[in-house]
Amino acid sequence: MKLVINGDEHEVDAPVGASLAAVLRERLGLTGTKIACNEGHCGACTVMIDGVPVLSCITLAHSVEGEVTTIEGLRDHPLVDAFVRADAVQCGFCTPGQVVSAAALVAARPTPTEEEIRHAMAGNICRCGTYPKIEEAILHWRD
Amino acid sequence: MELLRPSSVDELDGGLFIHGGTEVVPLLRDGIVRAETLVDVRGVVPRGVTGGRIGAGTTLAELEADARVPDALREACRLAASPQLRNMSSLGGNLLQSTRCWYWRLKFPCRLHDGERCHAADGEHREHAIFGNDYCASAHPSDVAAALLALDGRVRTTRREIALAELYRLPDEADRRMTTLEPGELILEVEVQPPAASTYLKAMDRKRWSFPQVGVAAARTGGGTRIALAGVAPVPWLLDGPEDVERATPLPRTAWKVDVARALVRRALAELG
Amino acid sequence: MARLIRTEKEVEGRFEEVWLVVEEDPLEQWPAGPGEVVGRPAVRKDALERVRGEARYTADIRLPGMLHAALLRSPYAHARVRRIDLAPALALPGVRAAIGPGEAPGLDAEAGYAGAPVAAVAAETDAQARAALEAVDVEWEKLDAVLDPEEAVERGILHGEPERYERGDFDRAVAEADVVVESTYRTQVVLHNSMETHQSVCEWIGDRLDIHTSTQYVWGVRAEVARELGIAADRVRVVCEYMGGGFGSKNSAGEYTFAAAELARRTGRPVRCALTRREEHVAAGNRNATLQRLTVAARSDGTITALGGDFINALGWGGWSAATEGPLKMLYACENVRTTRSTAKINTPPMKAFRAPGFVEGTFGLECLIDELAARLDVDPLELRRMNYASSNDGTPFSSKNLAQCYERARKHWDRRHAVRARSDATWKRGVGMASQIWYGGGGPPSYAWTRVGSDGRITVVTAMQDIGTGTRTAMAQIAAEELGVPLDRVEVTLGDTARGPYATLSAGSSTTPSIGPAVRAAAADAKRQILEIAAQRYDLEERILDIRNGTIVSADGNLSVGLAEFLELLGSAQILGKGARGPNPTGMSVLTFGVHVVEAAVDVETGEVRVERVAAVHDVGRIVNPLGAESQVEGGIIQGIGHTLSEQRLMDEETGRVLTTSLDAYRMPTIADVPEIVCEFVDEPDAHLTNLGSKGLGEPPIVPIAAAIANAIRDATGADVHELPVSREEMLRALREAEKKERRGAPAAV
Ligand SMILES: Cc1cc2nc3c(=O)[nH]c(=O)nc-3n(C[C@H](O)[C@H](O)[C@H](O)COP(=O)(O)OP(=O)(O)OC[C@H]3O[C@@H](n4cnc5c(N)ncnc54)[C@H](O)[C@@H]3O)c2cc1C
Ligand code: SF4
Ligand code: FES
Ligand code: FES
């Protein structure tokens, strides 16, 4: 199986049924992508495929066709600094997934409204409750 | 396990279909469905909207953003699941999603797992059905199916074309399936005639990312107004009219859903004008 | 000098008489208000690596040769393993070891709840380990299970004896009162659901056991493991640098740690044992359900004359019984109080501390009751609270209490209620409710910190605490920077490893900042003293006229101004080492935190939907070290509280005792779309009696009053009394129907 991740091509050997999240974390050492539920309910494992946020824990690695972008590929995105400044991180376990969802949002809508942010980010659960700060970070991501 | 990726209908030969995998992957992992062969149908099932025809491979995210899609369906997609799930979820897969009944998901030996009783009816059923619930009390979780039912959608499969309503059946002792789809039959398209007006209202227990507690779709066409409900019966539920709500047969802890349904039906009709 | 004292130590509202060795703390508190660094918003020290996904959590630890362990759990609510055969599991591919009941602490033959662990398997992959569980052959003996807490109380199946408390003459006060209100409240079981599940990786290196674990208390795990395994504590090293949330559920080692340690010992390989989300929902702890039968009696002028409560804590198989009656005993001046708390021992998963255990539940009951009383008396709820203000804790003075100031500051939010109500229409009714907060949060000794200053003038604070996401790493850096007179970016903090730093207390009970902060300040002061001693010698000046300000050593006479880094160059490879300890708490005083929430809520009276539209929170937790981080804590607590109030509930099958809401589609926590406008204010007065900082903890206070404030806003909006959490549509519609009936009967409705 060949995967293009953050622009690099990887040759991976994994059984059919392996999730993209497991391949990223266990085979490629890309542990920035977190697994918090492993069943599609929380958003911690969010990555982009061709710019579209999906849940890597329920994506079969073998069915991936497009280019995968993980948090490792977004480390220099201005959103990272926006999250830091806004204090949009407490324990941080949900945060890489939040950044991936947010990056897709601002790529589609560079100046999203509060409503749009709430609609686009509702699939990323944060138990620490950083939501108000996430909203702030996204509203001011280019400052 | 193997994964096949056919590129035409002719190549189909058994196996478990998988499109977005949002249902299939967790169910496989839990051992609720089993398969030696997975068939990725993305290369086969049409995707996109042309006139009133919607490819079954269109994602809910695409439908949510498409102005050509009738309001009820668009709103049902917009309020379904989570953003990432809507990006992954196909329309066809949505219509075929399984119940969220916790007993079923946890593999209690209930009727839908070929067992002898409905654990929910005797047990924890506060999120369950108020109609058609005497054999299995589960509540159908598809917003999208309710919208399409109100819109009187038609489903084209690899074998036939049927009204959406005919896709579903209430399970009974003899036959516990909830759809009429045959093994190997693939949904290709859904067709909807543009209504004069349509709407979808959804009661949730949070503002987003929630299955319908009660979903009410209503559509007005030349022929009259159709009202269909999500989250109230084992299958998407068509009402004969607003007063049909009063014929509900709630379980002790689902009576509240009747109140919610009554209010939402009234509001939906008011919105249609 | 070290001093030995006998004192009461409080953790999560639990008190214990202990001997404590404390060091006196001679430092004067800084003046109130922001300093150069402390009291000013600071970006988290560890934010960048967390946001970029570089922080390595326990979940990310991969050691060479590591095996994966999985736990076999009881399918029955109460059962005993009569016979177990691990051999079929051991025969499966990849399986390297298996252990059964009694072979590791926490794996018991008697399973007290559905989900109790009884055996464990280690295999090359997680999937192999889980597959092997199914092959373990167990013969179960089913035992009588009690699942209903009221039944348990009736049958006397309790944890300990009922706790009774009485002051004054409750019965007489009730008999003589003008108004008596009795109400019953129920709170549900809720789950912590930290995003990183409970997990450990254990590795033996010779006779030393290294444990990477997601914990709130590295030292606690060290002590517990050493005790249970019978090895010297210094042979156990516990590491947790980044931690994905705990909320009280990760204060102890847990069977996953013990199973991993034992399987690692047997295989000679590192073993990882991580709970799945499903297991987390069953066996990682919970906030237990409560039943509260409350009574308040008052004179018609609003004076509360009696408060009473019969409480049942539905504890489950294990855990401890939190003081649900605490708020009722302490929040108001009331001479006659009587409470009983019975702790039902039922065959459900064990309780673990969850953000202000007991007080969250108890405040819901009490503060709803107070509003019901206000309605009966036709008194303004804010006035009623002010009228019954407690100026001491039943005779014991407070070390500081600024609740009155909180009320004062809340007034402008409270005054919005007329405008809010006016925005009601036929379906959406709007209203405003308030509730007060009381909780502990003073922390206590012991805790220690070291500081290390290098020749480059940079400072490292070393203390083996943990930052569970509350931002304490940053707060500690701020405190050190303030004391040493350097900018924040000169300070780093090393933490999370029992082998690399002195003892620091647990990160729970809102105790981290108030416990460790003063030790860090003392350690910084120690280093600063040494720097100034050297500077005095180097420049031949009197030490007492020297100071460090903004990274520069200056003399009061204005003659000296030299950069700290420049000066310290002379150290070469030498370092300045400071050490500090947490001093004692004030004796004979109650150290508590206070606050008020004012909530604006809207209720759809036809569908029972409740929306929280605005929350104003005013908290009194002493000095605020980092206003930015503090605001995040408050927001987080409020959002968790909104989940607790409206949508979260662990459901269980009444027949089998199995948890039904095992996944996050069924157990519904708030999303970003559920967040109201949140206004956050602090009194920010240092507690003059508490340590060299005057700071109390803030992790828990914000979750305490929110449920009652929402319920009271609902009453204000609709006249309906909700008595049960969560306020689901079902409960909301029930309460509305009840209110309607009451109105028809002509009883005075609340609005
Ligand atoms: C956590 C969660 C929350 C959700 N919330 C909502 C909600 O609020 N409202 C709502 O309406 N829905 C909701 N859904 C359902 C979601 O929209 C469906 O899971 C999704 O649409 C399924 O599409 P898929 O492509 O992923 O299907 P898959 O998982 O790939 O397949 C689902 C099923 O359909 C079969 N299948 C797929 N495509 C075809 C086809 N073309 N013809 C025949 N059979 C096919 C598969 O064999 C399988 O049995 C939720 C789902 C999840 C997992
Ligand atoms: S409601 Fe249906 S799926 Fe649920 S337990 Fe009953 S029979 Fe099974
Ligand atoms: S880990 Fe993938 S959605 Fe939770
Ligand atoms: S920051 Fe802890 S879960 Fe989001």
Image (cartoon, rainbow, N blue to C red):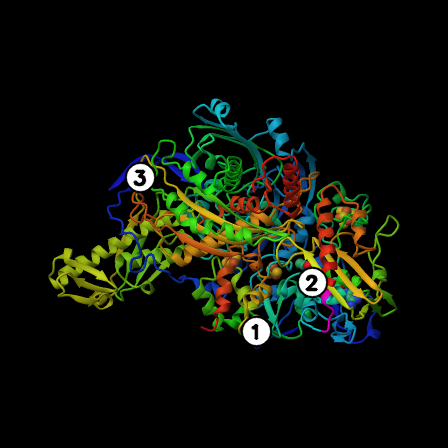
Please check whether the numbered discs 1 and 2 fall on a single chain: no
> In the image, which is nearer the foreground, mark 3 or mark 1?
1
Element at label 1: loop
State which region is magenta: B68-72
Q: Which of pointers 3 and 2 indicates the residue nearer the eye? A: 3
Question: At which x and y percent is residue B157?
Answer: 84, 69
Is C387 situated left or right of C196 in this image?
Answer: left
- Determine the image quadrant of residue A102: bottom right
Q: Is residue B69 magenta?
A: yes
Q: Amino acid at mark 1?
A: Arg
Q: Which mark is residue C586?
A: 3
Crowding near pointer 2: few (<14 within 10 Å), some, many (20+)? many
**Which image quadrant: the C terminus of chain B?**
bottom right
Q: Position of residue C443 (x, y in %)?
A: 38, 44
In the rendered view, tell whether residue C252 sits above or below residue C131.
above
Callout 3 secondary element: loop
Rendered position, A75 above or below A133: below
The residue where tag 1 is placed is A109
